[in-house]
Image: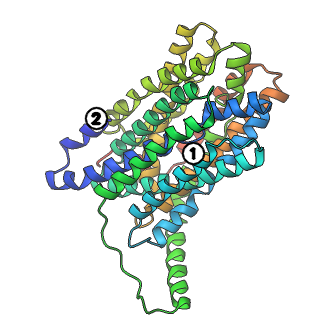
Amino acid sequence: MPGAIAAAKTTIPDTAEQRLWPVATVMATGIFATTLVQLQGLGSLPFSDVLMRRMGLNSDQAATFFSLATLPWTFKFLAGLLMDAVPLFGSRRRSYLVLSALAASALWLVMGLEPGNYDVLLALATAMNTAIVFGSTASGGLLVEAGQKFRVSGRLSSLRVFAQNLGAGLGLPLGGLLASHALGWTSAAAILPMMCICISAWFLLREPATVPVEPRRSFGELLSHVALSIGWQVKNVLRRQMLWPAALIFFIQAVPTFRSTCFYEYQTKTLHYSDAELGLLGLAGYGVALLSSGVYAWSCRKMPLRASLYGAIFVTSLSAVPYLFYTPYMPRAMGIESVGTFFQYLAYLPLFDMIVRTTPKGSEALGYSVLIGVWNLGLVIGTKTGPMLYEHVLSGNMSHLIWLNAGVTLAAIIFVYLLPGALVEKREGK
């Protein structure tokens, strides 16, 4: 994080920097916490253990649970629309951050009681994801506002990915250590970072005052005011400039992936890794991946975004290749996780930079969340189709799935070619 943020100091005047740092801190805290406590993070191994070992589900059935529970991330744009159009207590970011963190904490607390019913657990996990979607969306809105205002979209995106990798990197080993214990321990570990969001947003975030709604208006007039505001937000976001970036993001994420429940099954049943060992492997991967933020914070000022995106496609494909050599030998697996995860997140950074540049002014949370929603919709498809092909088409052959993932990813180059030049031909700050 320090390396990614420090790069912004050289070009931002002191007065502007003083306004940037509190926002960047709250944004990074929100991204870190909402990444850490997700089912894909802290909850990944404990929930996989509950579903596949205690409930006896196979990898395809477990993938269905995760896909359904994370579905609220696909509708993230609704949270963005609400934030941009309907300020809460005079705030478009602060109040939503605080309330979403409190709601997610309460739901994690209830899940910690470990209900044995599949449907109840799914409902609670889905509601928890809905709560942290609001926190993540508000953090994204802060990122876009600051990135466009101070022309540091690449470096703030690097900070965002650093915070995301830190959350994911800590979540996996911590989840691995807690997976063999009652789910209540995982619940307790999730509540603490949610409280960090509340504290940082409450004390550091100061937003411009919103135009108050006349208190004497009738209920019908208030509804009309909200409807007009929502209509303007929708019109502001539905622009042609969003089309090809959305297509590129969706295609890359929807490629059938091996980085899902099928790889967990392969690691535990075929290679006989324990949950604690998987947590250490995840820590090794995400620890090295933190370096990717520093690399892109430097490179985004040296080359146009289009060149970075071409490189991202190649690197995304390349990141799958090391997994062909995955073995039960722990040191080799750590090396593979480090190289593969570093390449994967280095490839994500130009995509996040593109999202910040694409988002229309005035609709920062909505525009950003629409594109992230497209990202998550593709991810839901990719994480479901990967295990489905692994179980029913490829007969459990992990190498074939890895080759399929790497080969199909390269086809995304055509979408980069179709991106508008005004969006991707310039370096950061130009």
Element at label 1: helix
Please tell me which residue lies in front, 89 or 267. Answer: 89
Residue 155's place in the image compared with 71, above or below, is above
**Residue at image mark 2:** 2
Q: Residues within 10 Å of mark 2 (few under 14, many from 20)?
A: few
Q: Position of residue 215 (x, y in %)?
A: 42, 88
The color scheme shown is rainbow
Q: Which mark is residue 44?
A: none
Q: Which residue is mark 1?
A: 249
Judge by depth and name the residue closer to the eye, 428 or 111. 111
In three-dimensional space, the C-alpha distance between marks 2 and 1, rounded to whole angstroms, equals 28 Å
Of circles 2 and 1, the one toward us is 2
What residue type is disc 1 on? Ile
Residue 2 visible at all: yes
Q: Nearer the viewer, residue 144 or 195?
A: 195
Residue 91, position in %: x, y?
A: 39, 68
| Observer-nearest of 337 and 184 | 184
